[in-house]
Image (tube, rainbow, N blue to C red):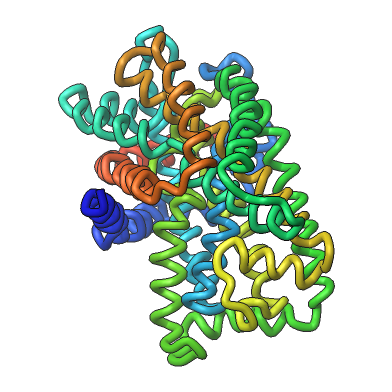
Amino acid sequence: MEQLNQYISDFASFAWGLPLLILLIGGGLYLLILSRFLPFRFFGHAINVLRGKYNNPDDPGEITHFQALTTALSSTIGMGNIAGVAVAISIGGPGAVFWMWVSAVIGMSTKFFTSTLAIMYRGRDSAGDLQGGPMYFITEGLGKSWKPLAVFFSVCGLVGALPVFNVNQLTQAINDILLRPNGVEVGFTSNLAVGIVLVIITSIVILGGLNRISKTASKLVPAMVLLYFVSVVIILIVNFEEVPKYFSLIFTDAFSASFYKGDTFLGGVIGGLMLLGIRRGAFSNEAGIGTAPMAHGATKTSEPVREGLVAMLGPAIDTLVVCTLTALAILVTGVWQTTDANGVSLTASAFGNAMPGFGKYLLLICIAVFSISSLFSYSYYGSKCLSFLIGADKKHYYNYMYIVSIILGATTSLSMMINLIDGFFALMAFPTMFTTLMLAPRVVKEIKAYKLRTFNA
């Protein structure tokens, strides 16, 4: 068993290794240049699309642009934004934040291309309903002979979408922030209770299908980002004298030759770009993994570029806003230098330092809402993969497997299972990015045609 555990751990490390780093960052950079830095040029137009300026209720699809974005964000805004940022800073110092920003800008171009393709090449499932996502743009864009690649993506998605890691981390946060400090004995029974509560909340939402998931997400996501934003603003006000110093340090340390933990340029690149921007950052903004296009592919629109523009706002909100808020909270309170805590505990220390008494509990509310909302959308992604593999009439079976995995995640610390899911999640990026790079020239043509239709009409 120990040897098997080691094999799976090695598999996860290999899956998230240098080839994936080159594919996600190198591929994203290529797409950014190919689109002539479209995320910057069309940002204002993307906001107008999101606001519903171009909505047409007669367009094909199930949900609005706003619901698609919030559904995708409900999966991306989670533990990566809180624990991942803390890990990056503890390894690379303030300079790591700069490389997070770089990875977010690159991620915006990737999200644009993958989600544009999700609308350009929608397919029909076995029930005849219109569907989008990597498995469909592989078969519809590259042709039926490429179906094995779509099947590979879907199989990886079945495992990669399981919520064991997320649930495990949330249970840990509840234990460390709420239960243990208040004298509650933590063990299998308390963890099971947490798992059952999560199952009840999740089941109510996911068994209602995409419409209920998207409606819940469209209310929950803006509220949770606002709550987190207000919480961090309070921390910044309490430590306002430190804000300018650390904001400038983010830039200077990203390129400095030395730091208290060694080489900061190396720490910044590896800690910020590789660790957060790839392994934790993929959990954070999922650019290039292929999950978000499944949500954006269900949007009511006949204009692929519009949905791509809405999708590209995801990494901007997720990384440039939420991750930056976490980073500033950790930096200005000084906890990153005064404690050995890491991950969620480091962020909790920052909140507790600035708001004694209730700060940690406020963070726990944010963590709980972030994590629970991500449970909704991941179930949709997994069931969509199962639908592609064995038929739309059987996709609900995934929800039962999903619910069992929530209990497993809460009651066990199966590193083997977490590594397995982690590895399969990474493997989803290979068919997604490979196909996106092959079809990218077609997206560029679509951008030109869209500009003529929209701005020269």
Report the front residue among 279 and 415: 415
Report the front residue among 38 and 415: 415
- Tally of numbered discs: 0
Residue 114, image x and y in percent?
Answer: 40, 40
Residue at image point 72% right, 42% down: 222
342 versus 142 height, above or below: below
Residue at image point 52% right, 47% down: 168
Report the front residue among 93 and 304: 93
Residue 415, image x and y in percent?
Answer: 39, 51
Q: Residue furthest left?
A: 145
| Residue 452 appears anywhere in the view | no
Q: In the rendered view, does 157 fall on the left or right side of 198?
A: left
Residue 375, image x and y in percent?
Answer: 56, 35
Report the front residue among 94 and 55: 94
351 versus 141 height, above or below: below
Residue 12, image x and y in percent?
Answer: 30, 53
Residue 325 found in image quarter = bottom right
328 versus 457 height, above or below: below
Residue at image point 39% right, 65% down: 274
Q: In the rendered view, does 119 fall on the left or right side of 78?
A: left
288 versus 176 height, above or below: above
Position of the C terminus, as image quadrant, is: top right
| Residue 10 appears anywhere in the view | yes
Residue at image point 63% right, 42% down: 190
Residue 388 found in image quarter = top left
